[in-house]
Amino acid sequence: MTRRRRRLLLIGAGGAVLGIAIALVLFALKDSIVFFNSPSDVVEKHVAAGTRIRLGGLVKPGSVTRGANFAVHFAVTDGSKDIPVAYSGALPDLFREGQGVIAEGSLDGTGVFEADTILAKHDENYMPREVADALKKQGHWMGENK
Amino acid sequence: MIAELGHYALVLALGLALVQSSVPIWGARIRDPALMAVGTSTALAQFAFVALSFAALTWCHVVSDFSLLTVFENSHSAKPLVYKITGVWGNHEGSMLLWVLILALFGALVAAFGSNLPAALKATVLAVQAWIAAAFHLFILLTSNPFARIPNPPFEGRDLNPILQDPGLAIHPPLLYLGYVGFSITFSFAIAALIEGRIDAAWARWVRPWALVAWMFLTLGIAMGSFWAYYTLGWGGWWFWDPVENASLMPWLAGTALLHSAVVMEKRDALKVWTVLLAILAFSLSLVGTFLVRSGVLVSVHTFATDPTRGIFILAILILFIGGSFALYAWRASTLRQGGLFAPISREGALLLNNLFLTTICATIFVGTLYPLALEALTGDKISVGAPFFNATVGRLAVPLLIAVPFGPLLAWKRGDLYGVAQRLLVALAVAIVAMAAAFAFAGGGPVFAPFVVGLAFFVMAGAITDIAERTGLFRVPFAAAFGRAVGLPRSAWGTTVAHFGVGVCLLGIVGETQWGAERIAAIKPGETVSVRHYDLTLDGMRERRGPNYQERIAHFTVRRNGEVIGAMEPSTRAFPVRQMSKSEAALMTRGTSQLYLSLGDVDSAGAVTVRLYHKPLVLLIWIGAVVMMAGGALSLSDRRLRVGAPRPAARKPALQPAE
């Protein structure tokens, strides 16, 4: 085999692996990325029922009700719009009324957000960045460190 | 006073770094030995001053000097001493100081033990190392001064984030930094080679031990971080595809590729230009990791503070070094002479395939990690690219790579015989098929994927052993003779076997935990029982306990297996009053390599406590596998051939020992 043919073979193999990788990436990106939306976004953009999104905002004070079998209902608010959320499972330690939260899931046909994952990764002065941005946009931001 | 001393020492270190970055390289250009020697002394002195500065900061933390902003924000007088010390790097400023401390340490190691390097190469390497050091010294002094004072010192500090008050924090960041920053040495060697325009097999022999050291620490650091997340976050996840984790995985993949391509370069004088590129890439990805973690673009437990000037400063460093090195590469790479030829089916070919897949996986992770940031910057849309993306891409790309792993070491250099190798791997294949069948029977049907991966893991492990068995003639010659040959084998051969075996072990742990784990969530009152698999856990009662800086609520569980008492588990939740945070402390019970994992949630109004109970089969193998990989690296490192300065059987003590 000549040097030239070997090199062509190498480039071919490299190209093939890269091609497969690019195909995988595009395929996976189409299927598995999730957009972040605030309650106002959900209303304004008319997010379709069944589309998987992340919904972020504050847990509306007084809205949390617990049912049997770890069912939880609460509302996520950004100050101007509220979206009711239904979730079933153990809530994270840091889930509290009035605190930032991100729920991942999709809207059912009736406007209730069915969440399968609840993220509340914040301490007393940290809020998920997306939530902070969304609140700033709605003019409800209270400042950097509370 | 101590703090000012530390600050001053850091300024002096910057001054020394500036001298080190200019004088030796000028000396190398005009071939002046005296000027070149300046590099050695400044590198040692720079390390001494950074160490002094770090010691000063540690002192301020230990004596709880709350007039320092970093101490006030991250410490508390009631915090246990060990966390006062580890708290030094539990915040942005201190962790950056640790970063440059390790950077200076590696520079000093080259200076101290590199006496057998060609003088010009050594001088250039030290100068490049100092460029990096100077940039980061400036970064610390201008944007993240750990010695900043508060005009009216408060009486008490704000305590360290409870999640960080853990023995894991004591070791995870230093290990990870030793890995990240260790690649700065291979980077400096690569840049020096490009500047000198000369590169040969000897260069690879010098570089490989450094790459190995960095890789070993990075392996251990990532495993440690994963284990820490596993037991500290309360739901037993060990890998989240969090951008910060990806940031450490990318240099690891590039570094693994570098290790393998350096073998080709050392043995066959081929793939030179590629090896240099990988050396640049590995450190560039370490810098990208530092940027992602430290700039505040991402929010996670690793992001201590968000300050835009810091982000822009690190971005500038990033552009300067990555852009500069790639420009230099594009300009000078053509001057490096091309090396040996090889057939596609050969050891070189196999190592190249390994590189191809590792770099492609790395690129995929890079896209998945940075795409959301790019998209948000361009369109304002916020998206999350999570585990499904990475599992779909990385998982699929890893399968062919893992299948190829046992073939590589068995192929001959230059021109290999794939059919012959396949025949020799028949035993390994048989082991794999038996394992696959056993796993399928054990799981009682279900998806084929999990048994397939179990088979793959056994194929990798058995393949690693095949290599050693072939070399020693095990089962073909008398055992004593085989043993004699095994002792006589180069340690690097053992290193390869052990490291590849570790990959298989780790894979087995991953598939066990992800495919066969079980989870129960329940709200129970004292006297009630929660069960998973054959295990029944009865809540006996709750009690309160006071810790040094927290209040703890402990639940006592009796664990029974098939009705027989096998032990007790005591998960707890700790409330930290200073930060008004609570943290759940999971209880773990080890059964072989599997674990029971129990963590507590809230107590509801009726007095029932939420518990999360997991059964995690084979989970410990994930980290044992990583440790085995690291041990393989250590064996390889102890190989005499790899010790720079001992190309011949050592009659005298080798001058350069790889870093301990």
Image (cartoon, coloured by chain):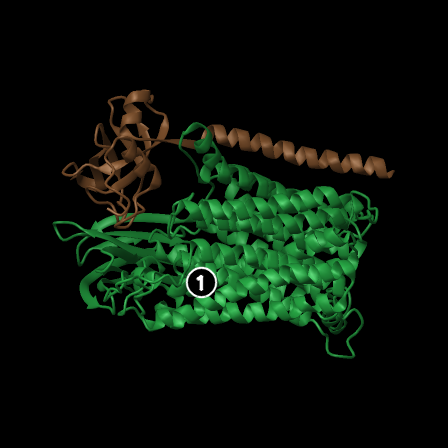
Chain colours: A brown, B green
Q: Where is residue B497 in the image (x, y as percent from the top left)?
A: 66, 60
Write down the quadrant of residue B550 in the picture.
bottom left
Q: Position of residue B463 (x, y in %)?
A: 66, 54
**Quadrant housing the C terminus of chain B:** bottom right
Closer-to-camera residue (B368/B150): B150
Q: Residue furthest left?
A: B606
- The type of residue carrying mark 1 is Gly
Q: Where is residue A21 in the image (x, y as percent from the top left)?
A: 60, 35
Per the image, the residue denoted by label 1 is B592
Where B146 falls versus B602 (above or below)? below
Q: Which residue lies furthest to the right in this view?
A: A2
Where A127 falls versus B5 (above or below)? above
Q: Provide the secondary structure element on which disc 1 rests.
A: loop
Circle 1 packing at 10 Å, graded few (<14), some (14-19), many (20+), is: few
Is B161 positioned to the left or the right of B206 in the image?
left
Q: Residue at x 83, y 49 (%)?
A: B340
Is B349 positioned to the left or the right of B111 in the image?
right
Closer-to-camera residue (B96/A93): B96
Q: Where is residue B314 in the image (x, y as percent from the top left)?
A: 50, 48
**Quadrant housing the N terminus of chain B:** bottom left
Where B613 falls versus A54 (above or below)? below
The answer for which chain carries disc 1 is B
| Residue B102 in view in this figure | no
Number of marks in the image? 1
Is B21 positioned to the left or the right of B450 in the image?
right
Q: Which residue is drawn at 51% across and 51% down?
A: B248
Where B70 falls versus B433 (above or below)? below
| Residue B72 in view in this figure | yes
